[in-house]
């Protein structure tokens, strides 16, 4: 039976959120496909870490271990790497603290703490700004998409932290070379949704990553894209009590390869998910999905995916965070002017935050991807923004939580 027939019969319309998923956690996901490197090779300013108000593109918010306060006494032997961070003095400006060296990121000093020059550049709390102003919606360069995520610093050597490469891909990592309007760099998403960091945010869609009135915008709830795709291992991910489709269509993604600062303990980014499938097609085999595959996958990831709710549900219309719709806690204001407000019933999440642990100096890849499940109808769009390294110490969990709206 077609989706249209199902909708007319009212078979769907299940509004509940379903607990638990059957996906195996802690799995790995290989990242296929090529990556492009920065064309200019310049080192641009980094962006903030989680934990509070970062100010204008701040790299971190509070002092982490080694990020402030007095340091324990140690013996600083000239020319010897006393703290074991890979750097010896005079290159290391504090060889008694492994969180201070030229490969570290600057951490904003907490109130009452002693200021520290974490990156040994001779300046304290020199936090760089963002880098996504004046980007065009239709810009096809994956490096521009990375800037829209507020990833601004390019790694300048084998020990330096920052961006190592980026590429447009299909969901399984296969390179995507043809221009497409399934991704776009947006200054807003309607009048009520603004970027969480900087001036722009990235939109990826199983339909069109365009707003009404923009060139290439979709004028129905379903616009075909790249057609049949190959899902990453373990996907589409099932939700307990719901059927799951076996095929994906119109998949598109951005893969980003980075090296973490030597004092980083985690990463963080914001996203939202919009879908025409809500509420008619909740808990059906057609449910589109958004994923953020991390490699190497941290413990607790679901098939490598780090964006899921507390019950392990993948990001789809079954996720626990669907709060934007008629009668939902956040109402319909964030649907206005997006195209999801006029064409059909639709819903969305509010802003969400995904975090995951990393090791200092670790190379990591993130693949953000979205697709239609089971058919090419009733498209979905994800907004992604405000990537940050976390260098405030402590243990960083893997998973997703709602943000203050």
Image: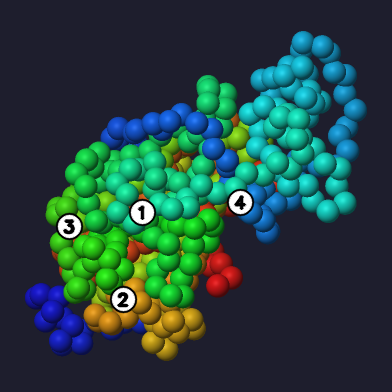
- The residue where tag 3 is placed is 225
Sequence-wise, the earlier of marks 1 and 3 is 1
- The residue where tag 2 is placed is 340
- The residue where tag 4 is placed is 57
What distance separates the C-alpha of mark 2 from that of mark 1?
22 Å
Sequence-wise, the earlier of marks 2 and 4 is 4
Q: Which of these two is toward me, 190 or 35? A: 190
Looking at the image, which residue is at 85% across and 47% down? 113
What distance separates the C-alpha of mark 2 from that of mark 4?
31 Å
SS label for mark 1: loop
The image quadrant of residue 295 is top left
- The residue where tag 1 is placed is 136
SS label for mark 3: loop
Indicate which label's residue lies in the foreground, 1 or 4: 1
In the image, residue 220 sits, relative to residue 94, either above or below, namely below
SS label for mark 4: loop
**Quarter holding the C terminus?**
bottom right
Residue 50 in view here? yes
Indicate which label's residue lies in the foreground, 2 or 1: 1
């Amino acid at each position: 039976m077609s989706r249209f027939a199902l909708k007319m019969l009212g078979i769907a319309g299940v509004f509940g959120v379903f607990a638990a998923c059957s996906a195996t956690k802690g799995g790995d996901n290989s990242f296929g496909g090529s990556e492009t490197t920065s064309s200019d090779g310049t080192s641009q300013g980094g962006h903030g870490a989680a934990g509070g108000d970062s100010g204008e593109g701040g790299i971190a918010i509070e002092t982490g271990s080694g990020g402030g306060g007095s340091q324990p006494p140690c013996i600083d032997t000239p020319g010897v790497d006393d703290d074991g961070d890979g750097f010896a003095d005079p290159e290391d400006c504090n060889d008694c603290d492994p969180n201070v060296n030229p490969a570290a990121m600057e951490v904003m000093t907490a109130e009452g703490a002693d200021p520290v020059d974490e990156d040994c550049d001779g300046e304290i709390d020199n936090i760089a700004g963002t880098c996504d102003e004046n980007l065009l919606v239709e810009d096809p360069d994956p490096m521009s998409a990375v800037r829209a995520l507020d990833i601004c610093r390019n790694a300048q050597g084998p020990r330096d932290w920052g961006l190592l490469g980026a590429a447009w891909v299909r969901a399984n990592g296969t390179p995507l070379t043809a221009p497409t309007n399934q991704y776009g760099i947006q200054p807003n998403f309607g009048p009520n949704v603004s970027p969480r960091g900087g001036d722009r945010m990235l939109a990826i869609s199983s339909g069109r990553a365009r707003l009404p009135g923009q060139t290439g915008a979709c004028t129905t709830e379903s616009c075909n894209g790249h057609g049949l795709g190959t899902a990453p291992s373990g996907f589409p991910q099932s939700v307990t009590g719901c059927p799951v489709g076996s095929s994906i269509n119109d998949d598109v993604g951005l893969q980003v390869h980075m090296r973490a600062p030597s004092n980083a303990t985690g990463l963080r980014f914001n996203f939202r998910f919009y879908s025409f499938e809500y509420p008619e097609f909740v808990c059906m085999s057609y449910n589109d999905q958004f994923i953020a595959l991390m490699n190497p996958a941290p413990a607790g990831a679901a098939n490598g995916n780090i964006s899921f709710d507390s019950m392990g549900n993948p990001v789809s219309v079954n996720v626990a965070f669907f709060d934007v719709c008629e009668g939902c806690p956040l109402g319909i204001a964030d649907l206005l002017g997006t195209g999801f407000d006029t064409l059909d019933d639709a819903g969305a999440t509010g802003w969400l935050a995904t975090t995951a642990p990393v090791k200092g100096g670790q190379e990591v890849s993130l693949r953000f991807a979205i697709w239609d499940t089971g058919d090419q109808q009733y498209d979905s769009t994800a907004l992604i923004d405000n990537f940050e390294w976390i260098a405030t110490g402590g243990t960083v969990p893997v998973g997703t939580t709602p943000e203050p709206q």
